[in-house]
Image: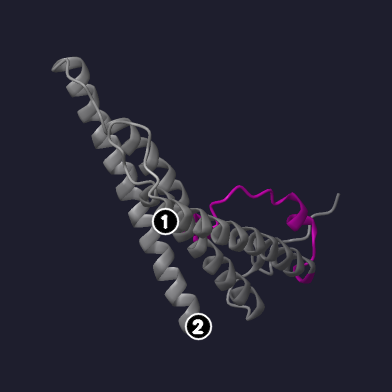
Amino acid sequence: MAIFIRFVKKISTVCGMISAALLGGAILVVCQMVFIRYVLNGSTVWQTDYITYSMVAATLIGSPYVLLLKGHVNVDLLPLFLKPKARLYLALLASAGGLVFSATLAWLGFVFFLEAWDGGWRTDTIWELPLWIPYASIPIGIGILALQYVADVLALITGREMPFAMDDHTPVKDI
């Protein structure tokens, strides 16, 4: 189990690096597009599509890394008022909900990717990018997000990780 958790952690970290590279690439293409348009007075054909799809891919592929770092939006008001055992149950419930949602979205994203692949779908722009390329980020990113949820649940169950990134010594607040 520890091997699985470490493996998923490494995959999620790689996803974070890929996401950063996609964002960096998008920034460079924006700069190139501005230069071409406003300095050279030329036309840009593929840049807008590239920027849009790379930003979306960065968001989807980077989501497992964000979950690994516990960087998703989290309101910790309720966990602060709960005893450690109740925190664990709430964390397991929240992670199970996230796992069901992400597994469903990954599966439907894979079906969508296959439709684009089989149908030869392309963008309606001059670039005519095959749409399976940007659509692949849905099952890849969200599928790995589902794996990260599985690793989080296993870490919670085995006591390797504390619920909501709190320790057992976090005091229960009184109203």
Please report the residue visible at 79 percent of the width from the left and 56 percent of the height from the top: 81
Say if residue 109 shows up in the picture: yes
- Answer with left or right where residue 110 lies relative to residue 31: right
The magenta span reads 62-85
Check the image and report above or below for 141 versus 11: above
In the rendered structure, find residue 118 and report the number of the disc placed on it.
Answer: 1
Q: Residue furthest right?
A: 175
Q: In this rendered view, identify the residue nearer to me: 170 or 122.
A: 122
- Answer with left or right where residue 33 lies relative to residue 148: left
Q: In this rendered view, identify the residue nearer to me: 127 or 58.
A: 127
Please report the residue visible at 59 percent of the width from the left and 63 percent of the height from the top: 103
Task: Characterize the local packing of mark 1: few (<14), some (14-19) or many (20 or more) Cα atoms within 10 angstroms.
Answer: few
Q: Residue furthest left?
A: 40
**Residue type at mark 2?**
Ala
Q: Quadrant of residue 129?
A: top left
Check the image and report above or below for 3 versus 74: below
81 within the magenta span = yes
Tag 1–tag 2 contact (CB < 8 Å): no
Check the image and report above or below for 127 versus 77: above
Of circles 1 and 2, the one toward us is 1
**Residue 1 at x, y percent in the picture:** 53, 84
Q: In this rendered view, identify the residue nearer to me: 175 or 143.
A: 143
Q: Quadrant of residue 150?
A: bottom right
* Residue occupied by mark 2: 2
Task: Characterize the local packing of mark 2: few (<14), some (14-19) or many (20 or more) Cα atoms within 10 angstroms.
Answer: few
**Residue 56 at x, y percent in the picture:** 43, 43
